[in-house]
Amino acid sequence: MSGHSKFANIKHKKEKNDAAKGKIFTKLGREIAVAVKEGGPDPAQNSRLKDVIAKAKSNNMPNDTIDRSIKKAAGDANAVNYESVTYEGYGPNGIAIIVEALTDNKNRTASNVRNAFTKGSGNVGTPGCVSYMFDKKGQIIVAKEECDMDADDLMMIALDAGAEDFKEEEDSYEIITEPDNFGAVNDALAAENIPMAQAEVTMIPQTWVELSDEGDIKNMNKTLDLLEEDDDVQEVYHNWDE
């Protein structure tokens, strides 16, 4: 995400996602299945599932689709076993990239991820090579055009619920939480019917890197597009200031 207009970038990403909503919902369904298998079908007792549901809702996944995914995962003893794998590496000009995947075939996923990096003139590194440049945080983005609440009131609701930071951008508000407090803050905003453009536990870069060379920009986009198209890839984090 951009350092200056997070919402513009999210909106761009969402519009892109709208063209492939089925694929996004499939990936979210996979995350729900893994969360249910790990901690059970009750979000009140399963914080990971609760966080995935918040993420699904911010991606406009219908409630009945979410419920169906949970029931299916809870009742299907023969479901595919997905394993969480994380890859770290570098894009053009040293851009840091983290790839999170859920896979039933680690060899296939590793090959596809390596291919995406290579085609964009980057390379996969060793575990930990770039993750130290990111902080794991809960992040909620509220678009100003969708929220008529006063900024101070919104800030107080968020901070009272346990948020650690509140920033006002040109077109949005950004609320940052510790991962453990994300659920409580999300619930507090949902209780006030505040629409959220994004609500998820994510990896936030400590610093951003700009690309000025057209070839580097093209290569970076190529890597991101290939990773986005991969069914095994759930999330891609990077520190490119687009």
Image: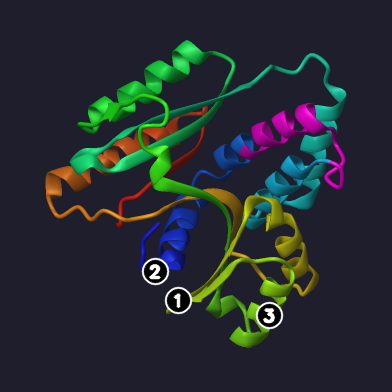
Residue 5's tag is 2
Image side of residue 226 versus residue 72, left or right:
left
Q: Amino acid at mark 1?
A: Glu
Instruction: Judge by depth and name the residue closer to the eye, 235 or 90.
Output: 90
Instruction: Judge by depth and name the residue closer to the eye, 10 or 187.
Output: 187
- Residue 200 seen in the figure: yes
Question: On screen, 201 above or below 72?
Answer: below
Q: Position of residue 24 (x, y in %)?
A: 57, 41
Q: Amino acid at mark 3?
A: Met
Q: Earlier in the sequence, mark 3 or mark 1?
A: 3
* Quadrant into which the C terminus falls: bottom left
- Residue 219 seen in the figure: no
Q: How many C-alpha atoms fall within 10 Å of the one at disc 2: few (<14), some, or many (≥20)? A: some
Q: Secondary structure at mark 3?
A: helix
Q: Position of residue 65 (x, y in %)?
A: 76, 44
Question: On screen, 148 above or below 232?
Answer: below
Image side of residue 80 versus residue 99, left or right:
right
What span is in magenta? 28-45
**Distance of mark 3 from mark 1, alpha carbons?**
17 Å
Q: Secondary structure at mark 2?
A: loop
- Asked whether the residues under the numbered discs 1 and 2 touch, taking CB atoms below 8 Å apart as contact, a structural biologist would say yes
Q: Amino acid at mark 2?
A: Ser
Judging by the rendered image, the residue that carries numbered circle 3 is 156
Q: Residue at x 34, y 55 (%)?
A: 207
Q: How many C-alpha atoms fall within 10 Å of the one at disc 3: few (<14), some, or many (≥20)? A: few
Judging by the rendered image, the residue that carries numbered circle 1 is 169
